[in-house]
Image (cartoon, rainbow, N blue to C red):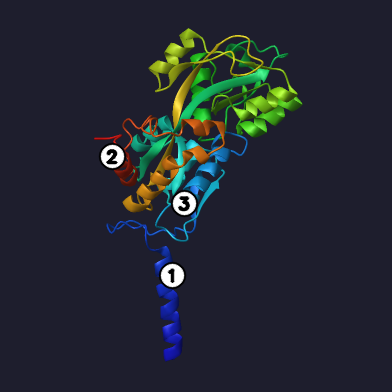
Amino acid sequence: MKKKFYSVFAFLLTAVVILAGCGDGDGNAEVNIGNLQLGTGSVGGTYYPLGTEMATVIKNNIEGYDGFDLSAVASDASVENLLEIGDGNFDLGMTVHLPALDALNGEGEFSDAIDNFGFMGHIYPEVMQIVTQENSDIQSIEDLAGKNVNIGPPGSGTQAAAKLILAAYGLEDGDYTPFEEGFGDAAGRIQDGNLDASFGLLGLPASGIEELAVQRELRLLPITSEALSYIEENSGYAAITIPSDTYDFLEEDIQAITAYAVLVASTDKIDEDLGYAMTKALFENSSQITHSQGAHLTKENALLGSDNIPLHPGAEKYFKEEGLLE
């Protein structure tokens, strides 16, 4: 009996040691640093491949945490990532900064406020790109009425922005047939002729669009100045020009809207010390990222999109150390 007692005690002690290290001593949940998860987006979009590289860079360069492991997880992007952090299922997440603000305030897609996350850094500017085949009869966003249109996965930043843009043109639910997919799946449907157009909140240039352009001649739909005014009055999106040299098929500059992709982390599961080590590992070694959008992951850009989003204590410590904050 005594031998059995000590065996059970040893097992429990080992489990505690494995799980320890990330609680802040104030009641925060403990976390297994050997099984951390970063919520990204759909496999065919920008978040997943970029997030996979970000996770690898952090894992390969973090200091002081033996057994540390961080995996990128495919998801429906912004809203789902924030909800999963709120529920304690994801440790970090990629999101457009606007849904993050909605989450804090319990607005938009969020029926209840989520406040257990903190800003870990800017990733890259996201640009809404609306793609159709060049030989289609769709010349403008108004022409999407009655068409098969991919508006992005439920709860994604893409879908929220797509509905806002469509509303700016007087198009509501029922005026078009919606598909709710990641851009990778939508690109396949456009190529096969089963989808008329797709919205994608993506990096610039977007590899998915470049790959599709090899198979089909494409057109990007611009946002008019009148619609842009409506969008700016009803959201935090800003105007951006997509230069004509962004893609080979563009013949002129295209007016679009943009927001920031940012990284956030759970303040319940990632304490200050671990958050500091992760932020430092990412920003000190971002040059190891080969994805084109990794070029935006710099110390100089680190605080873009952080307005009104609380900083994670660990990230705040690092940014102050680097002279980015007073």
Q: Residue 142 occupies which quadrant of the picture?
A: top right
Q: Is residue 45 visible?
A: yes
For the point 35% across and 37% down, the residue is 104
What residue is shown with label 1? 15
Q: Which label number is shown at residue 89?
A: 3
> Which numbered mark, 2 or 3, is in the foreground of this view?
2
Above or below, 270 relative to 227: below
Secondary structure beneath label 2:
helix
What residue is shown with label 2? 320
For the point 37% across and 33% down, the residue is 101
Above or below, 175 relative to 38: above
Number of labelled discs?
3
Outermost residue, bottom direction? Answer: 1
- Asked whether the beta carbons under mark 2 and mark 3 sit within 8 Å of each other, the answer is no
Q: Split into 4 quadrants, where in the image is the N terminus?
A: bottom left
Q: Can residue 271 be seen in this view?
A: no
Above or below, 148 relative to 67: above
Q: Residue 248 occupies which quadrant of the picture?
A: top right
Mark 2 Cα-neighbour bin, 10 Å: few <14, some 14–19, many ≥20:
few
Image coordinates for residue 215, horizontal then vertical, percent: 74, 24
Of the two numbered discs 2 and 1 on the same chain, state the one appearing first in sequence.
1
Secondary structure beneath label 1:
helix
For the point 41% across and 17% down, the residue is 232
Report how far apart the C-alphas of labels 2 and 3 lie in the structure. Answer: 29 Å
